[in-house]
Image (cartoon, rainbow, N blue to C red):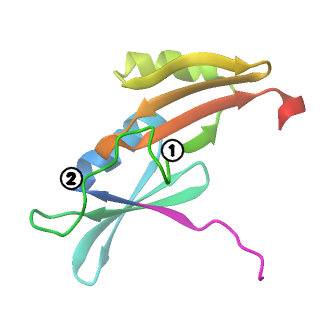
Amino acid sequence: MPQLTFDHIHLRSPDPEATAAWFEKMLGAEVIRSMQQGAPRIDLKLGGQKIFIMPVAPGDAVNPAPVTPCQGLDHFGYFVKDIDKAFAELKAKGAVFTQELQMPRPGIKTLFLRGPQGVSVELLERDEKYR
């Protein structure tokens, strides 16, 4: 098997602008606007990764977002160096948490937020010995 490297996350949204604005406001994502086949396109850069946002129009044959926890892809996680500070900043911005700051085991702190279309995002901080 050839070596794999992660390339992107693909989100479908009925309101790509609002989705991009949430990721920019809450998590500091870089919003990249371009044109693709004559239509506007919105991509994000977050944590060194690309997130592509595909618009969903009424009548498109797209299933509704799952409710977490769910089978299949449940969430994606980002490491943060100061989760206590991140938690305070997100709370001040009005983030909706599905799990507020907690320590599930020694050396690990986590929190989960609900993003657009029910996307679940985990932020976690690990002590050096657990990286």
Secondary structure beneath dot 1 equals: loop
Report the residue that reaches farthest toward the left. 59
Closer to the eye: label 2 or 1: 1
Q: Position of residue 107 (x, y in %)?
A: 79, 21
The residue wearing badge 1 is: 75
From the image, which quarter does the C terminus lie in?
A: top right
Q: Amino acid at mark 1?
A: His
Position of 58 relative to 88 (above/below): below
**Stretch of the chain drawn in magenta:** 1-10
Q: CA distance from mark 2 to mark 1?
A: 20 Å
Q: Residue at (25%, 59%) from the top-left corner? A: 63
User: 10 Å neighbourhood of mark 1: few (<14), some, or many (≥20)?
Assistant: some
Q: Residue furthest front?
A: 71
Q: Is residue 129 magenta?
A: no
- Residue situated in front as seen by the camera: 14 or 28: 14
Tell me residue 98's x, y (percent): 43, 25
Asked if 57 appears above or below 18 in the picture, the reply is below
- Determine which residue is flagged by label 2: 15
- Specify whether 36 is left or right of 9: left
In the rendered image, residue 9 lying in the magenta stretch gets the answer: yes
